[in-house]
Image (cartoon, rainbow, N blue to C red):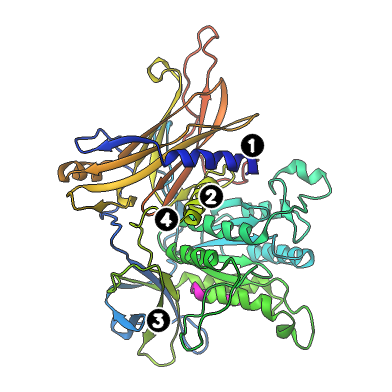
């Protein structure tokens, strides 16, 4: 997204904080979501937190241990044992193939609900152009295609590229031929930044898809990981992030061993910690693969690249994954990563310590069975979402995250689920495009306060991207809900509404619709389409918003606007 657009989005987001369009203590008239999308049976509270843990258990030979019993596993938080809520083992089922979900929505209704059902886990391949040199990037490209040639297509896989921002090359699919095609079209010149979409065929007529730009590698990398966490938030189960990269640009998380004391880190340390926490909250485990292989000093390869490799290794271990370094068989590393992350135990607990002081809490999982090694996330930040407003830096970062979620080159963000109906201009809409948001209340953070009412604060915004010209924003609006018990029950059985209007000239538009929970900072975003007719033409009528509200998973990504 261009910097000018980002600034425009941020200006609109500032307006959201001051624009109240709805305050409810009586009976609302929410739009009911489609019956095809069943909400989970729970209320998301700001005052509770469920810590989800994925455990990979292996024996001395590295083989998966699949028969651990709940009583053989103990969870400790800052040294104190926690009570497990559940404990189960998940692995790919050969009789149950991964498949795309058909939600059967009306043609003018869109949703950011999960549209691909996995088989125990999801695999995300991140091809890191930004932090990888050209010779190693070319080698990794060939090795990835080699993996796709030989691996069985039984796990849903998506491919992203990291250049001057995050690009979706292909959404989740089990069609390895489609993934190979998009990778063959992907070209670049090593550790430089993307200036156009990597799938733009016109760019290949020039000498390169990539060129040098003055972007900050640190922020670009951090933003990419935060975006992946938002995109994958609602996908249930473990997500294996196969990160093909030579290095991470800064130190990762603080040493949580008090005997050694804190690590000295640079100005990005807090941002890196929060990014790592976001990945772990989304159940994303990093499997870092160094494409440099056995480069450098032939006799001492680990010492020659120790600093770069240690950053990859620590990020992987902190999130419960692994790092593969000093090896030339990258295709085997990718296959091993996916196999390792597809068979795991999942458990959860509600922390006994209810003091949300924002500090890092160390998680330790032990087993009484000898010879079993466990890998899992190492901790989380005990942040109290009810403390509003946050610091100026946190407010700014939230605005940036929301603006980036509205990037039309990215897939949906699923932190806050919603449906949206897009109504073309008519006399009933005052000749404006109307967008009716229906927010899933089970993904909204409600806070029951001393007045006995359920409080929530969510914002919605719509942006229209024409074929030519600058994008057009709706200005945004905020729903300040204060619900009594009866109204709250009705909302939980339907949806929380929000409306936006766009004044658009005749033409075809891609819409990017976004919502954010101001308490939890959860974000949802999706793409929609609308055609605005020229009402001055004889016989002009308002058409349907698009020929298809939910297109099939992309074989190739859309070209940037």
- Secondary structure state at the residue bearing disc 2: helix
Instruction: Residue 211: give x, y in percent of width and height.
Output: 78, 52
Sequence-wise, which precedes: disc 2 or disc 3? 3
- Secondary structure state at the residue bearing disc 4: loop
Q: Determine if the magenta segment contains residue 476.
A: no
Marks 3 and 4 in Cβ contact (< 8 Å): no
Q: Residue furthest bottom?
A: 370
Would you say residue 557 is visible in this rendering? yes
What residue is disc 2 on?
400
Sequence-wise, which precedes: disc 2 or disc 1? 2
- Secondary structure state at the residue bearing disc 1: loop
Sequence-wise, which precedes: disc 1 or disc 3? 3
Instruction: Residue 1: give x, y in percent of width and height.
Output: 62, 44
Mark 4 and mark 1: Cα distance apart in space: 34 Å
Closer to the eye: label 4 or 1: 4
The residue shown at (35%, 90%) is 368
Sequence-wise, which precedes: disc 4 or disc 1? 4
What residue is disc 3 on?
364
Mark 2 and mark 4: Cα distance apart in space: 14 Å
Mark 2 and mark 3: Cα distance apart in space: 33 Å
What residue is disc 4 on?
390
- Secondary structure state at the residue bearing disc 3: strand
Instruction: Residue 542: give x, y in percent of width and height.
Output: 47, 18
Quadrant in the picture for residue 44: bottom left
Sequence-wise, which precedes: disc 2 or disc 4? 4
Magenta-drawn segment: 318-324
What residue is disc 1 on?
561
Instruction: Residue 110: give x, y in percent of width and height.
Output: 43, 38
Quadrant in the picture for residue 428: top left
């Amino acid at each position: 997204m261009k910097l000018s657009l980002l600034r425009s989005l941020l200006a609109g987001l500032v307006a959201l904080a001051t624009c109240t369009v709805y305050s409810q203590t009586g009976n609302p008239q929410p739009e009911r979501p489609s019956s095809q999308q069943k909400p989970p049976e729970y209320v998301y509270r700001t005052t509770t937190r469920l810590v989800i843990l994925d455990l990979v258990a292996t024996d001395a030979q590295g083989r998966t241990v699949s028969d651990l019993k709940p009583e053989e596993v103990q969870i400790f938080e800052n040294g104190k044992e926690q009570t497990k809520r559940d404990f189960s083992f998940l692995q790919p089922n050969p009789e149950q193939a991964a498949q795309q979900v058909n939600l059967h929505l009306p043609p003018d209704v869109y949703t950011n609900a999960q549209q691909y059902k996995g088989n125990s886990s999801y695999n995300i391949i991140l091809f890191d152009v930004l932090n990888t040199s050209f010779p190693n990037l070319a080698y990794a490209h060939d090795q990835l295609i080699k993996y796709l040639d030989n691996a069985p297509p039984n796990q849903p896989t998506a491919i992203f590229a990291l250049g001057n921002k995050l690009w979706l090359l292909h959404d989740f699919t089990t069609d390895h031929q489609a993934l190979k095609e998009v990778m063959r079209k992907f070209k670049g010149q090593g550790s430089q930044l993307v200036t156009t979409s990597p799938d733009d065929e016109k760019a290949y007529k020039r000498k390169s898809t990539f060129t040098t730009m003055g972007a900050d590698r640190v922020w670009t990398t951090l933003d990419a990981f935060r975006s992946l966490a938002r995109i994958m938030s609602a996908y249930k189960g473990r997500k294996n992030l196969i990160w093909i990269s030579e290095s991470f640009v800064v130190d990762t998380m603080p040493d949580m061993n008090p005997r050694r004391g804190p690590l000295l880190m640079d100005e990005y340390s807090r941002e890196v910690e929060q990014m790592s926490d976001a990945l772990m909250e989304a159940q994303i485990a990093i499997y870092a693969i160094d494409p440099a292989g056995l480069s450098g000093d032939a006799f001492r390869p680990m010492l020659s690249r120790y600093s770069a490799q240690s950053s990859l290794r620590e990020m992987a271990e902190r999130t419960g994954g692994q790092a593969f370094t000093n090896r030339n068989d990258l295709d085997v590393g990718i296959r091993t990563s996916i196999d390792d992350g597809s068979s795991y135990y999942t458990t959860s607990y509600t922390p006994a310590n209810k003091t949300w002081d924002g500090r890092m809490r160390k998680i330790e999982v032990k087993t009484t069975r000898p010879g079993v090694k466990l890998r899992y996330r190492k901790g989380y930040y005990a942040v109290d979402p009810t403390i509003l407003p946050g610091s100026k830096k946190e407010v700014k970062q939230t605005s940036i995250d929301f603006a980036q979620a509205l990037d039309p080159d990215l897939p949906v963000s699923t932190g806050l689920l919603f449906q949206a109906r897009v109504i073309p201009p008519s006399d009933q809409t005052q000749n404006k495009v109307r967008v009716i948001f229906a927010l899933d209340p089970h993904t909204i953070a409600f806070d029951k306060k001393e007045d006995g009412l359920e409080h929530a604060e969510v914002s919605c915004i719509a942006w229209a991207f024409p074929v030519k010209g600058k994008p057009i924003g709706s200005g945004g609006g905020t729903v300040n809900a204060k619900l009594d018990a009866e109204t709250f029950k009705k909302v939980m059985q339907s949806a929380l509404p929000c409306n936006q209007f766009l004044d658009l000239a005749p033409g075809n538009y891609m819409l990017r619709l976004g919502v954010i929970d101001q308490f939890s900072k959860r974000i949802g975003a999706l793409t929609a389409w609308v055609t605005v007719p020229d009402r001055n033409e004889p016989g002009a009528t308002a058409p349907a918003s698009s020929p298809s509200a939910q297109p099939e998973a992309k074989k190739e990504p859309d070209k940037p606007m």
